[in-house]
């Protein structure tokens, strides 16, 4: 057990930067080669990331310093358990999303495909930098790179609606970035460092009021990408983007980066002991509980499928933050595991929305009567994802929500257990009618052919993520050691108290 210096974190970031350059130079001249670079880079990235998991499970930290700027300030990668969890999740799901994206853009003959794949690669490099950041400054740099790299994907369609959504996205996220930077400067002025530490490093630094102020601006700053209400409006607007981009936003990179930033602030900057001392944990839990309930109500009112999924994402991101805010072993473990389980379940649901659009050009829930007869594999995967989001076994969402529920009891806060259960009821209310109408209602069209699915390059990825969602619900350590990594992270964080 100790610190291991390795160049692997840097290689995991650089591999997709190299791919981005190759994609740009290959361009439209050879689409097969261009997409080969995307797939090759995604596989290499995942291989590098997964090779580091055994070292992390043994309690080690993997570190690589790119440059030291001043004492206490360095551009540094330092992989802990939480960072490894996020890195494994994002790198694996990028493989699946890349395959799906190829099927999607080819089926619709999307314009600007080179720009699309170029920015996708940049996004994943930035995401790896966020996951492996050793301090707040490194996290901030890659966090802002992710913002800029994602913006062209949001306005990809270049319609007036898409351009406005892109502008809104930039206004929200860049303003949030300024708040985060301000908080980082204040922390450095108090401590002389910004290095993450399990259990936090701000105890005894500064007055209670200045620490409360820093916590608020950092949570609000990262909370923009985590879509906490009332900072969420950019996310439903961004659903105008192509569906694989929506999947990237919701399951792989952007909103998960926001939640990851919030967890880092809660668990690695302030820590359980200081948050209890300042009574900030309870304020945060009530704050995100508002988001959980209201976002569920908004989801019920949406007819557009992607917008309903967007508000469901807002709901689940707030659940992750609430679970971590309990500051208990089960709560932290469940919150971290839900990052992964939600990633697989929600990407399945967005893949389904894209498959339906490619095959039928339908986007509204009211138009989906009987579509399960036409696309039984696709809608079967939707049913699996919806069950998991609602916390129904044997899908993996049950495990993460079970542990977060235990976390509320460990914290002696039954109110938040009630919030979790209410959220699950809302999940059932806005997802299960879709399943029922797609399989059991008579289609509005006279004839809907049976087994008329979207292209296999789209159906296979959504089936894979749906099946993995079930496997992780039965064997939570299958493939990725997610549960062990989450348990290791929770142990180190609480061990630092």
Image (tube, rainbow, N blue to C red):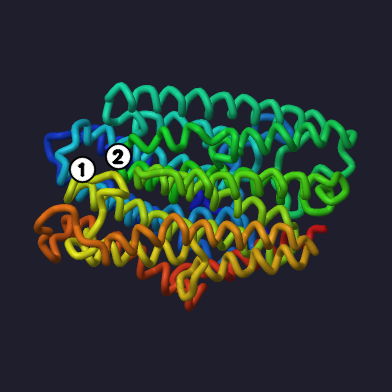
Q: Give the residue displayed 17% in from the left and 51% down from the top.
A: 359
Q: Secondary structure at mark 2?
A: loop
Q: Give the residue displayed 42% in from the left and 47% down from the top.
A: 308
Percent across and percent down for residue 355 are: 24, 52
Front one among 307 and 482: 307
Front one among 136 and 74: 136
Badge 2, how many Cα within 10 Å: few under 14, some, many 20+?
many
Percent across and percent down for residue 400 are: 57, 66
Say whether residue 426 is left or right of residue 335: left
Q: Quadrant of the N terminus?
A: bottom right
Percent across and percent down for residue 474 are: 48, 78
Q: Circle 2 sits on which residue?
A: 242
Say whether residue 471 is left or right of residue 43: right
Picture quarter containing residue 442? bottom left
Quick check: 187 above or below 478?
above
Say whether residue 48 is left or right of residue 55: left
Badge 1, how many Cα within 10 Å: few under 14, some, many 20+?
some
Q: Is residue 54 visible?
A: yes
Percent across and percent down for residue 124 are: 41, 44
Question: Is label 1 in contact with label 2 (beta carbons under 8 Å)?
Answer: yes
Quick check: 474 above or below 350?
below
Of the residues tagged 1 and 2, which is closer to the observer? 2
Q: Give the residue displayed 61% in from the left and 44% down from the top.
A: 291
Q: Is residue 11 visible?
A: no
* Residue 105, numbered label: 1
Q: Secondary structure at mark 1?
A: helix
Q: Give the residue displayed 74% in from the left and 33% down from the top.
A: 71
Front one among 61 and 473: 473
Say whether residue 187 is left or right of residue 218: right
């Amino acid at each position: 057990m100790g610190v291991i210096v390795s160049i692997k974190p840097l290689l995991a970031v650089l591999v997709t930067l190299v791919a981005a350059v190759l994609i740009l130079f290959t361009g439209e001249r050879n689409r097969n080669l261009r997409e080969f670079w995307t797939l090759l880079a995604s596989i290499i990235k995942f291989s590098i990331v997964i090779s580091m998991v055994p070292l992390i499970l043994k309690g080690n930290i993997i570190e690589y310093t790119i440059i030291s700027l001043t004492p206490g300030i360095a551009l540094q990668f330092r992989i802990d358990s939480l960072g490894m969890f996020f890195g494994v999740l994002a790198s694996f799901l990028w493989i699946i999303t890349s395959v799906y994206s190829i099927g999607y853009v080819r089926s619709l003959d999307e314009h600007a495909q080179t720009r699309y794949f170029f920015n996708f690669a940049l996004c994943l490099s930035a995401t790896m930098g966020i996951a492996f950041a050793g301090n707040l400054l490194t996290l901030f740099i890659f966090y802002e790179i992710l913002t800029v790299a994602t913006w062209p994907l949001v306005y990809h369609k270049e319609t007036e609606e898409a351009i406005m959504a892109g502008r809104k996205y930039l206004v929200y996220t860049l303003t949030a970035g300024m708040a985060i930077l301000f908080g980082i400067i204040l922390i450095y002025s108090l401590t002389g460092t910004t290095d993450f530490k399990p259990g936090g490093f701000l105890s005894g630094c500064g007055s209670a009021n200045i620490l409360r102020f820093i916590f608020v601006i950092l949570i609000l700053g990262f909370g923009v990408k985590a879509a906490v209400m009332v900072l969420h409006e950019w996310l439903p607007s961004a659903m105008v983007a192509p569906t694989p981009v929506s999947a990237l936003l919701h399951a792989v990179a952007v909103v998960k980066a926001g939640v990851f930033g919030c967890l880092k602030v809660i668990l690695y900057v302030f820590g359980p002991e200081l948050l209890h001392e300042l009574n900030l944990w309870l304020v945060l839990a009530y704050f995100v509980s508002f988001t959980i309930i209201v976002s569920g109500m908004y989801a019920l009112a949406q007819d557009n499928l992607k917008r309903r999924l967007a508000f469901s994402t807002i709901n689940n991101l707030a659940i992750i933050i609430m679970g971590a805010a309990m500051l208990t072993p089960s709560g932290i473990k469940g919150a971290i595991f839900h990052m992964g389980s939600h990633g697989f379940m929600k990407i399945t649901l967005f893949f389904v929305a894209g498959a339906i659009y490619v095959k039928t050009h339908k986007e509204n829930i009211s138009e989906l009567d009987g579509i399960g007869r036409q696309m039984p594999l696709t809608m079967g995967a939707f049913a699996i994802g919806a069950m998991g989001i609602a916390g129904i076994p044997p899908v993996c969402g049950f495990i993460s929500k079970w542990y977060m529920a235990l976390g509320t009891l460990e914290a002696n806060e039954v109110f938040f257990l009630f919030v979790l259960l209410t959220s699950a009821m809302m999940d059932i209310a806005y997802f299960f009618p879709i399943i029922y109408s797609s399989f059991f209602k008579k289609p509005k069209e006279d004839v809907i052919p049976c087994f008329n699915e979207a292209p296999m390059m789209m159906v296979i990825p959504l089936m894979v993520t749906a099946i993995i969602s079930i496997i992780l619900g039965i064997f939570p350590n299958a493939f990725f050691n997610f549960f062990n990594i989450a348990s290791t992270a929770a142990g180190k964080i609480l061990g630092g108290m």
